[in-house]
Amino acid sequence: MSKYPLLGMTLVELQALAKRLGMPGFAAKQIASWLYEKKVTSIDEMTNLSLKHRELLKQDYEVGALPPVDEMRSVDGTVKYLYRVGDNHFVESVYIPDDDRATLCVSSQVGCKMNCKFCMTGKQGFTANLTANQIINQIHSLPERDKLTNVVMMGMGEPLDNLDEVLKALEVLTASYGYAWSPKRITLSTVGLRKGLRRFIEESDCHLAISLHSPVAAQRSELMPAEKAFSITEMAELLKNYDFSKQRRLSFEYIVFKGLNDSQIYAKELLKLLRGLDCRINLIRFHAIPGVDLEGADMDTMTRFRDYLTSHGLFTTIRASRGEDIFAACGMLSTAKQEENNKS
């Protein structure tokens, strides 16, 4: 029987664990400190717990920190890491250094149910939700962990479709007993699920990024089937009920596809859709994936699109494209690893 991981547990869970094992109440905070502040990899290192309590813990528990099993390095410094989760599944995290910033793109599921046309992870179908341990481990076991300045929940999977575990991981990241990060260092990206979106906004202070990609409902449905369940117009109306004018940031992600959503008509529709929202737009170049007949717009087109939106009062940036030589868009490496394992 495998042991249960401590990494990813909240303070409340650690307090319940300490009580169950007959440990003193303060032991929970001591364990949390060893896990999240001192970042130990074994229970034996928790030296302010008595030997008896360490032995008791080790019977059924372990730290649960697992290093990546594979990596791909880009010429631009981007690194894609592959983590094993469960018996035979894999997820990816992408480390992106950029001057004085270093961002990690973190996964929340093995595969994804959303089946967005432009996403490799969606082609895998859905396999499993990650636990808080498996989410936190991508950060905790990252070789460049101590250089990280930001985390984005933009990897494999739809975070709002695994919200309980994602919120638990975000608590550990931001709580004083955990890593004590400011929520301003963390962004969650979502296609937008009705129930989960409202709950995330109300239970977390982290930044929010909405995958938009088209302001036209029929076209967005073609690109993103989730549009049929919760339309982008409904989403925009819901978001207007919340205040994003202070420390929390709301952004919309927009992949610019050649000849599809890259003309001024779409820019005008975006302005109409987002009127009244304190937000920004991130324009993204498309990373081609096998079997998908979409092409990315050229830089001149993207620049014109950005300048039109900015000149009409909507703050717009073009996100620098990173790691193209290692297929940094999530799903490629885990798909290859899964196929390799299936053959063997």
Image (cartoon, rainbow, N blue to C red):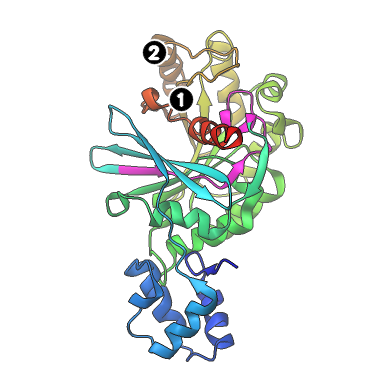
> Does residue 89 appear to the left or right of 281 in the view shown?
right
Q: Is residue 339 left or right of residue 142?
A: right
Q: Residue at x 54, y 49 (%)?
A: 243
Q: Is residue 265 above or below residue 6?
A: above
Q: Look at the picture and state if 149 lies above or below 17.
A: above
Please tell me which residue lies in front, 270 or 128. 128
Q: Is 110 colored magenta in this rendering?
A: yes
On residue 72, which mark appears? none
Q: Which residues are magenta?
A: 102-123
Amino acid type shown at disc 2: Met
Q: Is residue 67 above or below residue 34?
A: above
**Residue 152 at x, y percent in the picture:** 45, 44
Location of residue 121 by image quarter: top right
User: If you read the primary sequence from the N terminus, does the residue marked by circle 1 or circle 2 appear first?
Assistant: 1
* Residue at (43, 83) in percent of width and height: 54
The residue at the far right in this view is 229
Asked if one can make out residue 196 in the rendered structure from this viewpoint, the answer is: yes
Task: Identify the secondary structure beneath mark 1.
Answer: strand
Determine the CA span between mark 1 and mark 2: 11 Å
- The residue singled out by tag 1 in the image is 283
Toward the viewer: 219 or 291? 291
Q: Residues within 10 Å of mark 2 (few under 14, many from 20)?
A: few
Q: Which residue is mark 2?
A: 299
**Who is closer to the viewer here, 288 or 191?**
288
Disc 1, disc 2: CB below 8 Å? no
Q: From the image, which quarter does the C terminus lie in?
A: top right
Residue type beneath disc 1? Leu
Location of residue 85 in the rendering, given as x and y in whole percent from the top left corner? 54, 51
